[in-house]
Image (cartoon, rainbow, N blue to C red):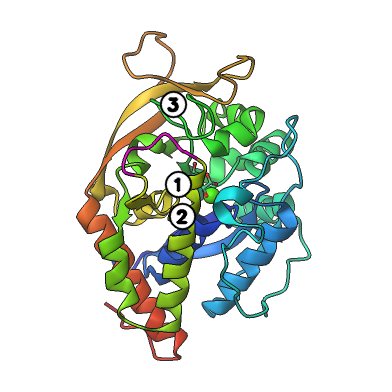
């Protein structure tokens, strides 16, 4: 990657515990130029996700516009994941009051303006339901030509975490997801197939904890809340009591270090009607449909390097959080 050329990105998220880990990695990267953060209803309500985004971005001393997204999915009634991310959306961690204000632009208007005014193509990083991006494409299809690709945490080729076949982000708003998947904009999908392999172990969390800093303690509290409550929701994941899957981190890690991942180009559509399968991403791994292979579906990650990247991000932001200058490496 050109060391001098930063990648312009917009981040659309629903903080959410793993969304916060994703933001930490994004803030730590010298390779990203974060133009805008927009928030989705998903892990929690829009009021809570935008508050959490403002609080964590302020806590990390970042000066980035944060714009409010829509309140509800296109047609489905919003189902939040309080049982996993807590009533606040950030487990039992209380961050300082945010200093960053909410943007006076809506997420849709802000994304439209940033994309159309950009001289170069922008990467969209999305780690929640796709309600905002689906609405953006319906209202302003002219922005599509300014998007290099969407790095998306969502969906699954095999197995779900909300129903036996559907993943949470797509399940919450399958109609918006289908609008995005059929948009023609290139997508790199970090579905459960790869995020189930992108895990951190209790021993690795202990390595973070021994640093003893406030940021490390907050990160560990969030991760422990996540693993404890994931167990209660009986997600059908083996070993889920001993590891935590850093789902959303994959969407940023791929943009920064694509070499850590491997995947296949496939046709992907979203099932909207199935009594048992609504919200399922139907991944045509063997080109049975003969339809365009619109999505790179990731299935492999170099886990150790992925975790080391996360460790380095915590270390870098820890110094930064104490007011020390980040090392430029
Ligand atoms: O299925 C995992 C996804 O759902 C992650 O984005 C997590 O934050 C939740 O939104
Ligand atoms: Ca998320």
User: Could you tell me which secondary element the residue under label 1 belongs to?
Assistant: helix
Between 258 and 278, the residue placed more toward the observer is: 278
Q: Residue drawn 63% across and 65% down?
A: 52
User: Could you tell me which secondary element the residue under label 3 belongs to?
Assistant: loop
The x, y position of residue 14, in whole percent, is 60, 53
The x, y position of residue 189, in whole percent, is 42, 37
User: Could you tell me which secondary element the residue under label 2 belongs to?
Assistant: helix
Whether the magenta-drawn stretch holds residue 189 is answered as: no
Which quarter shows the C terminus?
bottom left
Cβ atoms under marks 3 and 2 closer than 8 Å: no
Q: Is 79 rendered above or below residue 11?
A: above
Q: Earlier in the sequence, mark 1 or mark 3?
A: 1
- Residue pushed farthest front? 232
Residue linked to disc 1: 231
Report the span colored magenta: 234-239
- The alpha-carbon separation of the residues under discs 3 and 2 comes to 36 Å
Which mark is on residue 228?
2
Q: Would residue 252 appear left or right of 203 to someone viewing this image?
A: right
Residue linked to disc 3: 294
Cβ atoms under marks 1 and 2 closer than 8 Å: yes
Label 1 crowd (10 A; few <14 / some 14-19 / many >=20) = some
The x, y position of residue 226, in whole percent, is 47, 56
Q: Residue drawn 63% across and 42% down?
A: 133
Q: Main secondary structure of the magenta part?
A: loop
Q: Earlier in the sequence, mark 3 or mark 2?
A: 2
Q: Nearer the viewer, mark 3 or mark 2?
A: 2
């Amino acid at each position: 990657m050109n060391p001098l050329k930063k990648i312009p990105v917009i981040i659309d998220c629903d903080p959410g515990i793993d969304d916060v880990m994703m933001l930490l990695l994004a803030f730590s990267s010298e390779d990203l130029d974060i133009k805008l953060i927009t928030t989705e209803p998903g892990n929690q309500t829009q009021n809570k996700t935008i508050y959490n985004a403002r609080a964590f971005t302020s806590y990390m001393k970042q000066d980035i516009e944060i714009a409010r997204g829509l309140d509800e999915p296109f047609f489905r009634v919003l189902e939040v994941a309080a049982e996993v991310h807590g009533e606040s959306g950030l487990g039992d961690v209380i961050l300082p009051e945010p200093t960053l204000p909410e943007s006076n632009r809506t997420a849709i208007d802000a994304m439209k303006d940033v994309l159309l005014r950009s001289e170069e193509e922008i990467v969209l990083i999305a780690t929640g339901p796709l309600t905002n991006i689906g609405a953006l494409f319906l209202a302003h299809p002219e922005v599509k030509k300014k998007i290099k690709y969407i790095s998306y945490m969502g969906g699954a080729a095999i197995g779900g975490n909300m129903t036996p076949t559907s993943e949470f982000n797509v399940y919450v708003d399958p109609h918006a997801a289908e609008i995005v998947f059929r948009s023609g904009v290139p997508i790199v999908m970090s579905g459960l197939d790869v995020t189930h392999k992108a895990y951190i172990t209790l021993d690795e969390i202990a390595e973070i904890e021994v640093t003893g800093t406030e940021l490390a303690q907050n990160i560990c509290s969030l991760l422990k809340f996540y693993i404890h409550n994931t167990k209660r929701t009986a997600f059908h994941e083996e070993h889920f009591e001993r590891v935590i899957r850093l789902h959303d981190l994959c969407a940023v890690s791929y943009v920064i270090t694509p070499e850590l991942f491997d995947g296949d180009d496939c046709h992907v559509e979203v099932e909207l009607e199935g009594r048992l399968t609504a919200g399922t991403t139907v991944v045509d791994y063997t080109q049975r449909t003969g339809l365009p292979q619109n999505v790179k579906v990731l299935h492999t990650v170099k886990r150790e390097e992925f975790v080391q990247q996360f460790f380095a991000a915590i270390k870098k932001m820890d110094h930064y959080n104490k007011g020390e200058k980040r090392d430029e490496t």
